[in-house]
Image (cartoon, rainbow, N blue to C red):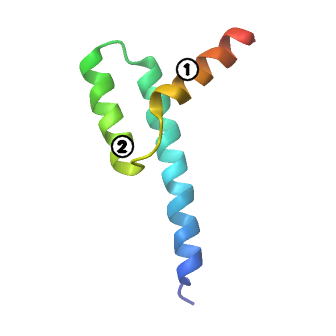
Amino acid sequence: MPRIERDREIARRRHRKVKIQKLVEKYMKATAQADKVVIATKVRRLSPYYNLEERVATLKGEQKAK
């Protein structure tokens, strides 16, 4: 039985979330500014309103707290 539109929408959202998480991890490990720009561009293409810098700052703050 084919998927209905709502199921496709949920699947896209879940896939996007996983992909952005992977890109954020790559961004945090990147040392060169050029690499960070490329990764930020990819994140912006997936989700234009995603605030990458704020998310990275939050994650670094959580790591320091541990």
Q: Is residue 55 above or below residue 48?
A: above
Check disc 2: other Cα within 10 Å, few if <14, some if 14-19, many if 20+: some
The spot of residue 4 in percent (x, y) is 56, 84
- Quadrant location of the C terminus in the rendered image: top right
Extreme residue toward the bottom, this view: 1
Extreme residue toward the left, this view: 34
What amino acid type should be assigned to the residue bearing mark 2? Arg
Residue closer to the observer: 41 or 54:
54
User: Which of the labelled discs sits on residue 57, or is there none?
Assistant: 1
Residue occupying image coordinates x 33% and y 48%: 45
Q: CA distance from mark 2 to mark 1?
A: 17 Å
42 relative to 1 in the view: left or right: left
Residue occupying image coordinates x 28% and y 27%: 37
Residue occupying image coordinates x 42% and y 25%: 27
- Quadrant location of the N terminus in the rendered image: bottom right
> Disc 2 on helix, strand or loop?
helix
34 relative to 31 in the view: left or right: left
The spot of residue 55 in percent (x, y) is 55, 29
Residue occupying image coordinates x 27% and y 31%: 38
> Disc 1 on helix, strand or loop?
helix
The spot of residue 59 in percent (x, y) is 61, 23
Q: Is residue 7 above or below residue 20?
A: below
The spot of residue 23 in percent (x, y) is 44, 35
What amino acid type should be assigned to the residue bearing mark 1? Ala
62 relative to 21 in the view: left or right: right
User: Which of the labelled discs sits on residue 42, or is there none?
Assistant: none
Q: Is residue 13 above or below residue 23?
A: below
Extreme residue toward the right, this view: 66
Residue beneath disc 2 = 44
Reading the chain from its start, which is encountered first: label 2 or label 1?
Answer: 2
